[in-house]
Image (cartoon, rainbow, N blue to C red):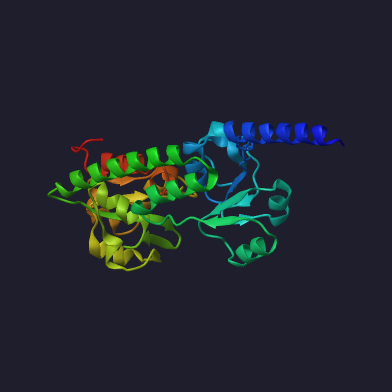
Amino acid sequence: MSRMTRYKWLIAAGCIAICAGCSPKQEPAKETAVVRVVSLAPSLTEMVCAIAGPEVLVGRTSACDYPPEAVKNVPVIGGFGAPSLETLLKLEPTVILETDLADETLGSQMDALGLHREPIRCRTLDDIPPAIERVGLLIGYEPQAHKLASELREGLAQLRAESAAMTTRPRVYAEIWNDPMMTAGKTTFLSEVVSLAGGENIGNEVEKDFFQVDPEWVLARNPDIIFCFYMGRQGSARDTVLKRPGWQQVKAVTNGAVYDGLENNVILRPGPRMLDGIRLLRQKISPAFPK
């Protein structure tokens, strides 16, 4: 290469470098992350659908039933908290959302297989808004999750203010199962719902989630209202309660305030419809207050 040719080449190279430095910096194109979510709990499935839609779901449990038109095409990967590991591997999820596993060894097995699982705490009413925000962060829908969580916090604050203004509270017996008889203790989500609906859960005297009781225990507390959160095996659950020996003198039975056929998947589920669940019970407990 001659001296003149080399000189011209250096000038051209310098101009190219200068022009490159003056032009706007080009960011590398970012690929849109594909979100593939598996939900191992009905409440989490509702959260995902509420903030992102069912399109991001690639797996759900057999208990995940809402919204029905949205989840009907989402494959079932097992029961509540009991997924099939083989099915999970085939689905290649980017994240697995869970609350309580049926067997904690499943969590260790998922970890060993390299599956990304995220436990989401959701046991109380106040757990629900931050749980929704956590889910939104994990699946890339933070603005939508924050909006929904804010609406729920505002609605919850309003219901608490209305509940605080209630001067009388009927005593409520919540029967979760009838054979053996089971009820909800003070530490349950349901106990919170009953309180905000205007009632006093007679099970609050026990610092447990759910516990077994006998008929005499209920009769001694003489509840004003009885809720049956199960389906009767023979006839209605309400009829079963009304026919129990000695229960004809219970206030709830005398006043006809024994209810079954409740929307359990709304009332008992700590998810985006929690405000609806409280209002549904309030219609039975304190009908004079806003719905």
> Which of these two is toward me, 112 or 225?
112
Quadrant of residue 282 within the rendered picture: top left
Q: Give the percent coordinates (x, y) of residue 8.
A: 76, 31
Q: What residue is at 42 percent from the left and 57 percent from the top?
A: 178
Q: Nearer the viewer, residue 29 or 143?
A: 29
Q: Nearer the viewer, residue 90 or 261?
A: 90
Tag count in the figure?
0
Residue at point 61%, 63% (across, down): 107
Q: On the rendered image, what quadrant is the N terminus found in?
A: top right
Q: Is residue 165 left or right of residue 58?
A: left
**Seen in the image, is 167 located left or right of residue 11?**
left
Residue 86 appears left or right of 104: right
The residue sitting at the right extreme is 1
Residue 59 shows in this picture: no
Is residue 152 or residue 270 the one in the foreground? 152
- How far across and how far down the image is residue 49, in percent? 51, 38
Above or below, 257 against 191 in this view is above
Asked whether, in this view, residue 185 is left or right of residue 57, the answer is: left
Quadrant in which the C terminus appears: top left
